[in-house]
Amino acid sequence: MTAYKEPGFQDRIAVATRARESAIARLKTKPATDPAQLVAKAKKALEREAAQATRLATLAQARRQAKAEKLAKQLAKDMPAPTEAERKAIRDARYAARKARTSSH
């Protein structure tokens, strides 16, 4: 029984050349593709691209939303707390708006 012999550089080149020639021969002997198959392939490719574009748009929207939320939190943290008079003014404005909505109906 012989020991395993590591293939040399020339052996690897020969194997690669045979594989390349075999692949080229297979491509040359392939029959022409059916137009319906070409249409199906193109349709699948367009669907994949549309799905990827949708995923990218969703991801971009999520990033924009996260950035806006982060900015809003930062601004809220930097703003001083409203005084008692400001809170009363805000509460009164909400009350007036609610009254205006209910009285107009």
Image: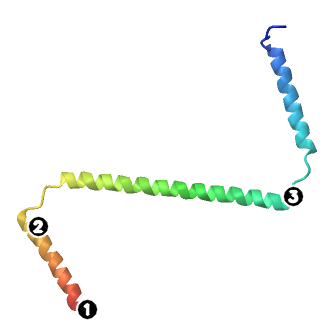
> Is residue 89 positioned above or below 32 on the image?
below
How far separated are the C-alphas under marks 3 and 2?
73 Å
Point 42% across, 52% down: residue: 63
Q: Residue furthest front?
A: 1
Q: Quadrant of residue 89?
A: bottom left
Secondary structure under tag 3 reads loop
Secondary structure under tag 1 reads loop
Q: Which residue has dot 2 on it? A: 87
Identify which amino acid the numbered label 2 is placed on: Arg
Point 19% across, 80% down: residue: 97
The residue lying toward the viewer, choosing from 78 and 31, is 31
Residue 104: % across, % down: 23, 91
First in sequence, mark 3 or 2: give its number.
3
Identify which amino acid the numbered label 1 is placed on: His
Point 63% across, 56% down: residue: 49
Q: Which residue has dot 3 on it? A: 34
Query: Answer yes or no: do the residues labelled 1 and 2 have beta carbons within 8 Å?
Result: no
- Give neighbour class at mark 2: few <14, some 14-19, many 20+ (Cα, 10 Å): few
Q: Which residue has dot 1 on it? A: 105
- Give neighbour class at mark 3: few <14, some 14-19, many 20+ (Cα, 10 Å): few
> Is residue 18 positioned above or below 1 on the image?
below
How far separated are the C-alphas under marks 1 and 2?
28 Å
Position of residue 67 in the picture relative to residue 92 (left or right): right
Q: Residue furthest left?
A: 84
Position of residue 39 in the picture relative to residue 92 (left or right): right
Residue 28: % across, % down: 91, 42
How far separated are the C-alphas under marks 1 and 3?
67 Å
Identify which amino acid the numbered label 3 is placed on: Asp
Secondary structure under tag 2 reads helix
First in sequence, mark 1 or 2: give its number.
2
Q: Quadrant of residue 36?
A: bottom right
